[in-house]
Amino acid sequence: MPDPTVANKIDMFIHCKLCLDEFYTQKMVAGLRNVSPREYAQIEVGWTKPGFQVWCKRHEINVMDVDFGGAGPFEADMSR
């Protein structure tokens, strides 16, 4: 059961740019009218030794890699 004392305070979501491009193209072509970018996203967020990483499962690319030691954040890999 969710903890009622902890609320979602996210003001802006982090998305994979490739997913967003694909989403808006598919929305026009395939009629994904009842799906939001949040529902379409397939990202994983997890801890790494220096910080945390946001990973796109759909495109198998780095969306964000944050290094709490001061060496990051690193740019997303948009080479594909």
Image (spheres, helix red, strand yellow):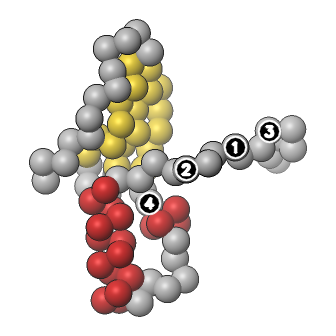
Circle nearer the N terminus (2, 4):
2
Q: On screen, 19 above or below 28?
A: above
- Residue 60 visible: yes
Dot 2 alpha-carbon crowd within 10 angstroms: few under 14, some 14 to 19, many 20 or more: few
Mark 1 or 3, closer to the camera: 1
Q: On screen, 12 above or below 65?
A: below
Residue drawn at x 35%, y 53% is 16
Closest to the observer: 73 or 19?
Answer: 73
| Circles 2, 1 touching at the beta carbon (< 8 Å) | no
Q: Which residue is mark 1?
A: 9
Q: Under tag 4, what secondary structure?
A: loop
Mark 2 or 3, closer to the camera: 2
Circle nearer the N terminus (3, 4):
3
Label 4 sits on what residue type?
Ala
The span from disc 2 to disc 1 (Cα, nearest Å) is: 9 Å
In the image: residue 59, left or right of residue 27: left
Mark number, residue 6: 3
Residue drawn at x 44%, y 60% is 41
Q: Which residue is mark 4?
A: 41
Q: Which residue is mark 2?
A: 12
Label 1 sits on what residue type?
Lys
- Residue 48 visible: no
Label 2 sits on what residue type?
Met
Mark 4 or 1, closer to the camera: 1
